[in-house]
Amino acid sequence: MHDALALAHRLEQAEGQANAAFVAARARLQPEVGAASTVVAGARCMFDGADSPLTQTFGLGLAPCDDAALDAMEAFFAERGAPVAHELCTLVPSDLVTRLAARGYVPLEASAVHVRTITPRAAPSGTLHVRAIGPGDAAMWARTAREGWSAEAPELGEFLEQMGGIIAGAEGATCFVAEQGGAPVATAALVVHDGVALLAGASTVPAARRQGAQQALLDARLAFAAAHGADLAMVVTQPGSASQRNALRQGFRPVYTRAKWVRALGVIA
């Protein structure tokens, strides 16, 4: 159990660090949003706008957390007009879940955390060219990511392109693009923290799907991560999703699940 908790702490800190970098990028690129983050009882509290999926905490319960700490977290979000959401690893003490329920929180959604050791392999030859983007490529990367993501949710197109720009502009994030015939067709990103490579930003335009773009991007990111001292790769998916099945095929193994516990704005414990 101790080893499992140590791994969970390492993984949650890696994702929390990455998301804090995204929030910092939002604060720099769109100061009108009022994006901010802080750390309370070892948990990262992040505000990225009231409706952003990044507005939540990471790592709650992996360090001691009393009611005063929960009060401070709730005040952080209330001051910014946002509901409180905690991404909770299932390995945290059970009494924390009981305390959250007593304070009016309910579980909203689940995610599964997967890891694999990094064993880079040579990039296959073919028509795809994969590279890390340069300083002038952020807008292109964001547009390409939007084209892939918004195929499933066209109503979120503008938000998704903004999110792509935030990822591309985040300190510590490295974004990759796969090109075919000189045209960008797929994107992916990673952030390396404490030897963990968090993989994110995967998107392929509909016309280029099932042609190996994401495999090529995965190989490129694993090679990059290994060269920068990472020994573990991490990916988060919805349980039972196509993304999870793809992760399992790529050698990732599930290590724990998480539940997002949410309390609506204005609820008083």
Image (spheres, rainbow, N blue to C red):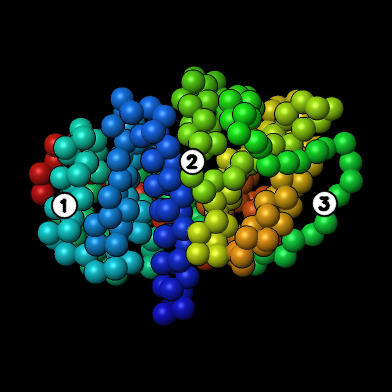
Label 1: which residue? 72
Between 226 and 232, the one nearer to me in the picture: 226
- The mark nearer the N terminus, 2 or 3, is 3
**Which residue is tagged 3?**
123
Q: Amino acid at mark 3?
A: Ala
Q: In this rendering, is residue 17 above or below 91? A: above
Mark 2: amino acid: Ala
Q: CA distance from mark 3 to mark 1?
A: 48 Å
Determine which residue is flagged by label 2: 170
Q: Secondary structure at mark 3?
A: loop
In the visual, does 138 lie left or right of 65? right
Marks 2/1: CA distance? 27 Å
Q: Few, some or many C-alpha atoms within 10 Å of disc 3 (few <14, some 14-19, many ≥20)?
A: some
Q: Earlier in the sequence, mark 3 or mark 1?
A: 1
Residue 239 appears in the figure:
no
Depicted 220 relative to depicted 54: above or below = below
